[in-house]
């Protein structure tokens, strides 16, 4: 390169693609006095269109790269000098805001649950807006543009820069999590059609193409590859509905249920299933709440008070005035395809708890879900523990067992037997380090057909024997 200044630009790398929402997204703007119906609103531009700030994407990518390669994260994303002699470094990455198109804003309910009683705390109900995920009826997508500028000195100190850039591209194609409630199934976005062009600024042809915004002749091949940090533990279970299921939608149907014009035959449905576009939905907040409560029950039953008092909140997260912990236990939202279930009206009577008789004028109707074929996986539950410890992996296995055997119920009306599951298959993945992925597969009879079952027993024993 002769006498080139080491600060001169060597490569320009352009990431382009269509970002899509794989789950609901909440990047909040706080409360809006002009829209009092919700406590938290999604971030919108001056034209009232929702968007994702480039800073949100930058922060997530920086955090992920720092977990894999701290030095590369400093070189690419920059840093602030910590001492008077350290000048710091400007970021080499620029990410534009992503303006989302064809979106639907939904309002979700939230409530604070007392961990001891399992009931809602008085005066702590709230609601919040979210951008609905991408579906066939709503795209919920936006153009993403990301530019990486590599100078000569950066190429020298980061000889594996191409592998680092490749890793970022693969992760964006596979998906990342943004915004709020990411531990409860929100914020999964991906760029499945990611295109990455590399322009060598020492070549006149590449400089010309860059200035004219023409495609580069050097295109990186992008794969949907998930890069998980050391210690990540993932449980994915496939279940059938053992009983009926009802996760109530806050908006109840007002029309008659049988299409009749006879006023005496008309009846309203007082509870209908929650939906996401055409699919039935079990919110990630509900799944996380159920698993958190069951985990506490398991620890109490085992007499693990030390874990409950000292380490439980560091795993499951906590947000109180005295204690704020980010959760390392993450769940996904559950989508149930309507072809696999039937939704039927069920009329019930309210019972007087003292006399045991029906209450006058207390007839009500609900529309629950029943599975058509119990041999077909209908419900997919996935939960992840970041930077997991042995006893935490054991806890994840005990939770899978309780879900598998129908000891944990999802949704409402647990007292009348709703919401119980039947395990069919499960996949367990453990990223022991950056190069070793251990995987186990369990069939419907509980048999481990792939992987060493002794290792799973060791995780379970780590929880049982914890002192």
Image: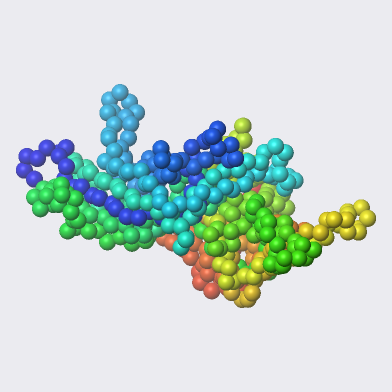
Q: Residue at x 21, y 44 (%)?
A: 150
Q: Residue at x 92, y 53 (%)?
A: 354
Quadrant of the frame with the N terminus: top left
Q: Using the image, determine if residue 3 lies above or below residue 425.
A: above
Left/right of residue 1 with respect to residue 394 in the rendered view: left
Up the image or down, 157 lies above or below 16; here it is above
Residue 133 image point, x, y percent: 48, 55
Depth order, front residue of 37/275: 37
Q: Quadrant of residue 152?
A: top left
Residue 346 vertical position relative to residue 372 in the rendered view, above or below? above
**Residue 410: percent from left, percent from top:** 66, 58
**Is 273 on the left-hand or right-hand side of 101?**
right
Left or right relative to 408: residue 280: left
Q: How far across and down, in percent of the image, does residue 129 sit?
A: 54, 45
Q: Which of 43/354 is in front?
A: 43
Compared across the picture, whether 354 is left or right of 408 comes to: right
| Residue 355, quarter of the rendered image | bottom right
Determine the residue positioned at 19% across, 50% down: 213
Query: 133 or 360, which is in the foreground?
Result: 360
**Residue that appears at 80% across and 63% down:** 264
Task: Give the residue at the far right of this rendering.
Answer: 355
* Whether residue 379 is visible: yes
**Color theme of the render:** rainbow
Name above or below for residue 251 compared with residue 343.
above
Q: x, y (%) of residue 117? A: 75, 46
The image quadrant of residue 426 is bottom right
């Amino acid at each position: 390169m002769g006498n080139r200044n080491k600060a001169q630009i060597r490569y320009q790398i352009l990431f382009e693609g269509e970002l899509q929402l794989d789950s609901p997204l909440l990047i909040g703007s706080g409360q809006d006095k002009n829209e009092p119906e919700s406590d938290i609103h999604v971030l919108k531009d001056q034209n009232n269109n929702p968007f994702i700030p480039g800073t949100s994407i930058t922060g997530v990518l920086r955090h992920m790269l720092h977990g894999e390669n701290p030095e590369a994260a400093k070189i690419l994303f920059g840093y602030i000098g910590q001492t008077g002699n350290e000048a710091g470094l400007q970021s080499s990455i620029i990410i534009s805001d992503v303006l989302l198109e064809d979106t639907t804003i939904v309002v979700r309910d939230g409530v604070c649950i007392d961990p001891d009683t399992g009931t809602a705390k008085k005066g702590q109900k709230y609601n919040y807006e979210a951008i609905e995920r991408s579906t066939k009826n709503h795209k919920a997508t936006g153009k993403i543009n990301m530019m990486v500028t590599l100078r000569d000195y950066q190429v020298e100190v980061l000889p594996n820069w191409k592998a680092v850039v490749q890793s970022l591209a693969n992760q964006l194609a596979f998906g990342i999590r943004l915004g709020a409630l990411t531990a409860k199934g929100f914020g999964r976005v991906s760029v499945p059609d990611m295109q990455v062009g590399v322009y060598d600024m020492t070549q006149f042809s590449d400089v010309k193409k860059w200035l004219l915004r023409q495609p580069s002749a050097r295109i990186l091949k992008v794969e949907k590859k998930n890069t998980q940090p050391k210690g990540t533990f993932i449980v994915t279970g496939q279940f059938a509905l053992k009983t009926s299921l009802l996760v109530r939608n806050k908006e109840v149907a007002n029309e008659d249920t049988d299409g009749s014009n006879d006023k005496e035959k008309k009846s309203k449905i007082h509870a209908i299933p929650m939906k996401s576009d055409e699919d039935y939905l079990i919110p990630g907040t509900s799944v996380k709440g159920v698993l958190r409560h069951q985990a506490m029950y398991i620890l109490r039953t085992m007499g693990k008070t030390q874990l409950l008092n000292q380490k439980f909140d560091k795993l499951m997260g906590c947000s109180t005035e005295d204690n704020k912990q980010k959760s390392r236990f993450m769940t996904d939202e559950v989508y149930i395809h309507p072809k696999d279930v039937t939704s039927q009206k069920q009329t019930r009577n309210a019972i007087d708890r003292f006399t045991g008789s029906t209450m006058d004028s207390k007839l009500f109707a609900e529309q629950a879900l029943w599975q058509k074929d119990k041999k077909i996986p209908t419900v997919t539950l996935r939960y992840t523990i970041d930077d997991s410890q042995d006893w935490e992996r054991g806890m994840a296995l005990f939770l899978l067992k309780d879900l598998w055997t129908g000891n944990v119920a999802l949704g409402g009306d647990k007292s009348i037997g709703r919401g119980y599951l039947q395990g069919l298959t499960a996949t367990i993945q453990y990223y022991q380090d950056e190069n070793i992925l251990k995987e186990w597969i369990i069939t419907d009879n509980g048999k481990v057909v792939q992987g060493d079952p002794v290792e799973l027993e060791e995780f379970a024993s780590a929880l049982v024997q914890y002192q």
